[in-house]
Image: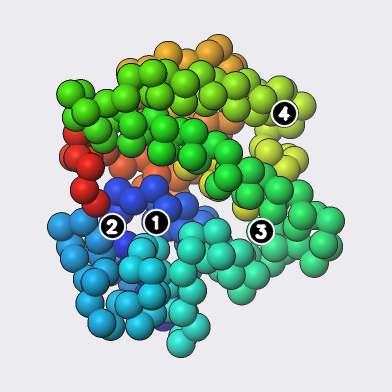
Amino acid sequence: MLTVWGRSSSFNVQKVMWLIGELGIQHRHIPAGGSFGIKNTPEFLAMNPHGRVPVIDDEGTVVWESHSILRFLAARYGRPDFWSEDPGTRSNADRWMDWAQTSLQPAFLTGVFWGYFRTPPELRDAPSVEQSIDLCAQYFQLLDQVLSERPFLAGDRLTLADIPAGTNLYRYFELDIRRPHVPHVEAWYERLRERPAYREYVMIPFEELRGRLDY
């Protein structure tokens, strides 16, 4: 059976759990990180020397790094909908996954969610947070243009392209921050909210993380 280590409130764990839910993979989930500990144990570090979650063990194959896990699970369990045999089709999803990880996630998760929500007010770098909010606005306006032409990032159905970027949406729309008018992103978000796996694994209240700089 597939085993997943990580805390449910972890953004990167949520990406993995959302795909697991979409694919209907039987699994067991072991809470790890934060108050659950485990990450610094010799057993965990033997699986992931970086001591980070998520980590999976699928019948002896251990994989860490959330996007590597997404690709592994899609390749093993998600053919053909989440893992096309055509390299060009896979590349379309890969591009959006890489963009989400290198552009959107640093701007929102690091710059806004950490810089604003998880940092106590007296410790916030207000100018830096404002810059990150502005950058997020640019990115979501870009996504709005793309989604004006199709319902999902890679076309007419959910693919791996949507998961890393789409995981940001619940937190982005729940925070009391400035947001641009992005009706096509909002419609995309509504489509994701209709999916049981998204509601179960991504739409998890995160108030416990307010003002907490520790994991």
Q: Nearer the viewer, residue 56 or 186?
A: 56
Q: Earlier in the sequence, mark 3 or mark 1?
A: 1
Q: Nearer the viewer, residue 196 or 14?
A: 14
Task: Confirm or deny contact between disc 1 and disc 2 (CB under 8 A).
Answer: yes
Q: Residue 152 location in percent, x, y?
A: 67, 37
Instruction: Tell me the CA gap for discs 3 and 2.
Output: 25 Å
Identify residue for label 3. Answer: 82
Left or right side of 26 for 161 = right
Tag 2: residue type?
Answer: Arg
Task: Confirm or deny contact between disc 4 and disc 1 (CB under 8 A).
Answer: no
Q: Earlier in the sequence, mark 3 or mark 2?
A: 2
Left or right side of 34 for 49 = right
Question: Looking at the image, which residue is at 41% across and 38% down?
Answer: 110
Question: Looking at the image, which residue is at 69% across and 53% down?
Answer: 94
Q: Earlier in the sequence, mark 4 or mark 1?
A: 1
* Eye-nearest disc, 3 or 1: 1
Q: Residues within 10 Å of mark 3 (few under 14, many from 20)?
A: many
Tag 3: residue type?
Answer: Phe
Instruction: Tell me the CA gap for discs 4 and 2.
Output: 32 Å
Identify residue for label 1. Answer: 13
Q: Residues within 10 Å of mark 1 (few under 14, many from 20)?
A: many
Identify residue for label 4. Answer: 146
Identify residue for label 2. Answer: 7
Left or right side of 17 for 149 = right
Name the outermost residue toward the bottom: 60
Q: Nearer the viewer, residue 80 or 29?
A: 29
Q: Earlier in the sequence, mark 3 or mark 4?
A: 3
Tag 4: residue type?
Answer: Val
Left or right side of 208 for 105 = right
